[in-house]
Amino acid sequence: MLLEPEFDVMRTDTLTKSACRIGMLLLPGFNSMAAQAFVDPFRAANYLRGRKIYDWQFLSPAGGDVIASNGIHIGDTVAITEITADFDLLLVNSSWTPEDFQDRALQSWLKSASRHGVTLGGIDTGAFVLAFAGLLDKHRAVVHYEHLAAFNELFPTIETEESLYSIDKLRISCCGGVAAADLALEIIQMQNGIELANAAARYIFHERLRDGGEAQIPRRLQPVGYQVPDKLREAILLMERNIEEPLTQTELASYLQLSVRQVQRIFKQHIGVTPIRYYLNVRLDRARGLVTQTELPMMDIAALCGFSRAEQFSRAYSKRFDIAPIRDRIEGRIPFQFRNFTDHAGYLSAG
């Protein structure tokens, strides 16, 4: 990917200065895999270089124990009010309910870091937190694909990318998961060269250094290695790009230069459902993201996802997800593994 010439903070030569200082702000329900994937390449780089060239610290709004979205606890985090370190890079790691973290104290702290020239970043839904604080204006942003539609609705003036990560001047964002390792390796490469980045990747068994502009979900090859026909990929892409005003089967077939029957046969053979059913599921999946991740009125969400009547939308949504959209707006804000418990107060109070 292209590296911005203004991105001076991350280009610092760590051979001639003290360790690059990284702070990761963990918000309740954060992405645990991304946190570990981001830190581990720096651990490997320190080991391989034989000295500490990267230093990191886990932070949280109140300090102490923080629970990730998968239930893992990270303890002894430092409260942002007690921070004395002068960070080079500060990342916000959030996953569930980023809209909950709009308090003035947190936003003031992030703005202060920005004024002092700290490079700010967001992992998974961390870009939401930065955007709520007005810190992503005139910058690109990357979020997890499940949250992309919600981000675009909430922040229509911020340019988004459905890619692994973005480095845009003094702003970084990443979709989360193992892509955080790719981002960390890119930073190592920028600061210390390709040789150390490759060595760190080998050390943690990371197969290759993926470019930040790569798609979060490669269109041609599914994660388990199953290759789908080009026409099927094109059909799915057309569906994903025409949510608010769905295409008819005839229109879809015309764009693909196939007959309606040929399109039906491709979907049945490779996915096991009809194009109509798959298209409906695409629209409902988009709707679920807006239901659980925004406060948009249900009628607006229905219209944005191609439903002309609220009753039709609610019925289809309930059938697909076995829960009414109005109820899912509440339940969908609780990480999945906690939903089996009758009392969610323990998790919610941790925030």
Image: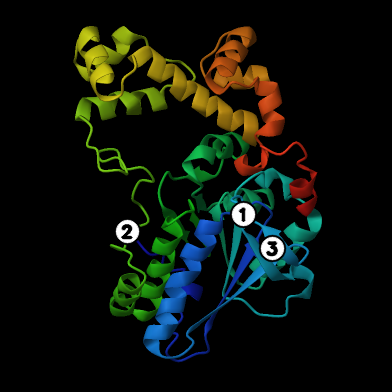
The amino acid beneath tag 3 is Leu
Mark 1 Cα shell of 10 Å, populated few (<14), some (14-19), many (≥20)? many
Q: Earlier in the sequence, mark 1 or mark 2?
A: 1
Residue identified by numbered label 3: 110
Residue 192 image offset from top left, x and y in percent: 37, 80
- Which is closer to the viewer, label 1 or label 2? 1
Q: Earlier in the sequence, mark 2 or mark 3?
A: 3
Residue 287 image offset from top left, x and y in percent: 56, 25
> Which is nearer the eye, 163 or 333?
333
- Residue 222, relative to residue 89: is it above or below? above
SS assignment at label 2? loop
Mark 2 Cα shell of 10 Å, populated few (<14), some (14-19), many (≥20)? some
Residue identified by numbered label 1: 30
- Residue 301, relative to residue 205: is it above or below? above
Mark 3 Cα shell of 10 Å, populated few (<14), some (14-19), many (≥20)? many
SS assignment at label 1? loop
The alpha-carbon separation of the residues under discs 3 and 1 comes to 17 Å
Residue identified by numbered label 2: 210
Are the residues at dot 2 and dot 3 in contact (C-beta closer than 8 Å)? no
| Horizontal relation, residue 198 to residue 328: left or right | left
The amino acid beneath tag 1 is Phe
Q: Total of numbered circles in the picture?
A: 3
Q: Earlier in the sequence, mark 3 or mark 1?
A: 1
- Residue 104, relative to residue 114: is it above or below? above
The alpha-carbon separation of the residues under discs 1 and 2 comes to 23 Å
SS assignment at label 3? helix
The amino acid beneath tag 2 is Arg
Q: Quadrant of residue 266?
A: top left
Residue 46 image offset from top left, x and y in percent: 44, 83
> Which is nearer the eye, 35 or 25?
35
Residue 74 image offset from top left, x and y in percent: 65, 65
Is residue 169 in view from this perspective?
no
